[in-house]
Image (cartoon, grey):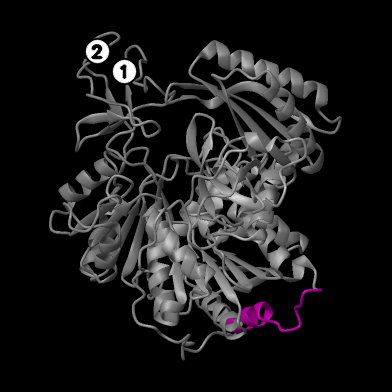
Amino acid sequence: MACKFFDLIFDIPADQSFTYLADDKGDAAVGKRAMVPFGRRDCLGFIIGESENPPEGMNIENVKKIRRVVDAQLLFDTKDIELAKWMAGYYLCSTGQALCAMIPSGRKMIVPSLGDTVEDNETSLSISDEQAAALSAITNTEIDENSSADQKMFYLYGITGSGKTEVFLRAAHFMLKAGKSVIYLVPEISLTHQTKQVINNRFGSLAATLHSGMSPSERLSEWVRIKRGEAPIVIGPRSAVFAPVQNLGLIIIDEEHDGSYKSGNTPRYHARQIAIKRCGTENARLVMGSATPSAEAWNFMQEGKIKRLDLSRRLSGGGMPEIKAVSLAKTEGCLSKELKEEIKLTHQMGRQTILFMNRRGFAHFYHCPQCGWELVCKRCSVSLTWHKSRNKCICHYCGYSQAPPSVCPECGCVEAGYRGFGTEMIEEEVRRSFPDLHLKRIDADTALKKSGSSGASLEETLTLFKNGVIDILLGTQMVAKGLNFPGVRLVGVVFADTGLHLPDFRASERTFSLIVQVAGRAGRFFPDSKVIVQTLRMEDPVIRHSCALDVSGFFNAELKQRKALGFPPFSRLIRFVIRSKDLKRADIAIKRLAEISEKLLPKDADMLGPAECPIGMINNNYRRQIIFRNSSLGSIHAMAREVIARYEKGKDSRTYLEIDVDPVSML
């Protein structure tokens, strides 16, 4: 009997395949995973090829055998392998790393709870003329496989509460009726639950969910159900873009501006870029939407590369809120007199309040006014945040914690203490000021609670707030994105300046989007809503544009500045970060990387650095960076690949190179 050979790839930086003999049971097949001996241990690999003969020059006696095949059914196909290869080329990683990011890691199947089967019922609610026009453009039957890419990409640009979701759902309904599948992306798991509920009401068990909050086995079960064609509509955050749907017709990216669509681990892919690639390869349409588009998307709309579809008015009886900036300069505590008065009035009207603060914990940093000493993490170059509920100073990057000092450890000053404030401090002040009101806080500290633990889960809290049980919802950016609560009259941005002047060229864009998005939670069903934006920078252009809800004005100014400085969307960036637990090794490695890069750098490109990263140390790892910049990606992309190849040949094993193509965060 002839031997059969299989090519496997692994979740390792090396971009090559390894050949193995078939397993004894004969279960191996392209599209399955298998446990095989790899070096001194057994590893899980992906089978991507098979042949009757070993590679040329390989001695068959040296070929190891597959120990066992993990999957009973095929998890991926040649289309997925090709996408992984494209990702490896674009994001400068290995094909194994790319495929690993695409495929769920579960080892066993569980039977999913499908609920009642519901036919794809299109709602009988009427839609506005603007919604109808947008839907008509998206579902235009004249768009075919010969249409250009920009004819298949749409941007639903509309104010908060203007009915974008209904257009998305009807476009999805159109595709399902045509026998095609839909991927519906949302930025956060908290939004996945809400969107899932809406989609389940519309499409029932035709819908599947994929997100990191599910167990690996649950994700694997949904993955297989999708692959079988049992769930033609898939909802989830970033990783759901890889869902193995049959006959893809449409990808929806809700809240397209959100930074969570960019992966923070290798491969550092952006779901928007993957969606564009999949739609191009599989002849599908792409619809993005937001009230605050990313700078890249706004620029593409201005250039006509994406068709813009406008929704200009709220449809549920609400109006755009009255927004007022209030100075915190002379305010004691977290809440200004104006904000307190509006909270009281809102409650008297039987309505609800959302308070937004994009910083958890009680206070932000420990400072000595006498000698200037600050308490920073021993493992990271960031301040420790005081969490009063746990009486600990905690690093939000590595988790290091210590007890808060009672006096300045440097000079003994008793006036040393914490400055700034977070959600815990705001919660305490709100409870003190409004003891009769029902308040709930949701941030990273509370959102991890499961149902049945002390307190409600995130999903339960949002449901209670929607049902009017909670008077005030206090939270971080979880409350700023896409949530729709009919009873909200007032939104208070407790401190708008938190991320305004970080050393990142996107800091203004992020601050503007957050303020406009959280302001959009107010007044969706009533015309008398208010937003109070508390700030120490009353004249800052970002504060002025956001309080005026002036998206065009903000982007006109922002893009003009980006163009003058040569930053995206008018350039492309590739960021190399060296990290090491040894400072000297990190410095030697970045210097060597810079020397290699200088020899290969194209004449029309820039090299920024080498330099210390804005956050110079995280979890005892020193961080150094080089950024390559050019007007187009091509030349620096080819150069980066050659730089990596040369650098790896003499690499110090105690240093690690992170590669980020089109970085979103520069910290």
Magenta extent: 131-146
How far is the residue under mark 1 from the one under mark 2? 7 Å
In depth, the one of 279 and 103 nearer the eye is 103
- The image shows a total of numbered marks equal to 2
Residues under numbered marks 1 and 2 in contact, where contact means CB atoms less than 8 Å apart? yes
Coordinates of residue 343 in the picture (x, y in percent)? 26, 59
Coordinates of residue 210 in the picture (x, y in percent)? 45, 61
Q: Residue placed at 53% from the left, 51% from the top?
A: 33
In depth, the one of 653 and 464 nearer the eye is 653
- Position of residue 502 relative to residue 207, above or below, is above
Q: Of helix, strand and loop, which one carries label 1?
A: loop
Q: Residue placed at 69% from the left, 16% from the top?
A: 592
**Residue bearing mark 2:** 413
Compare marks 1 and 2 and give the one earlier in the sequence.
1
Q: Residue placed at 50% from the left, 73% from the top?
A: 165
Residue 512 seen from this side: no
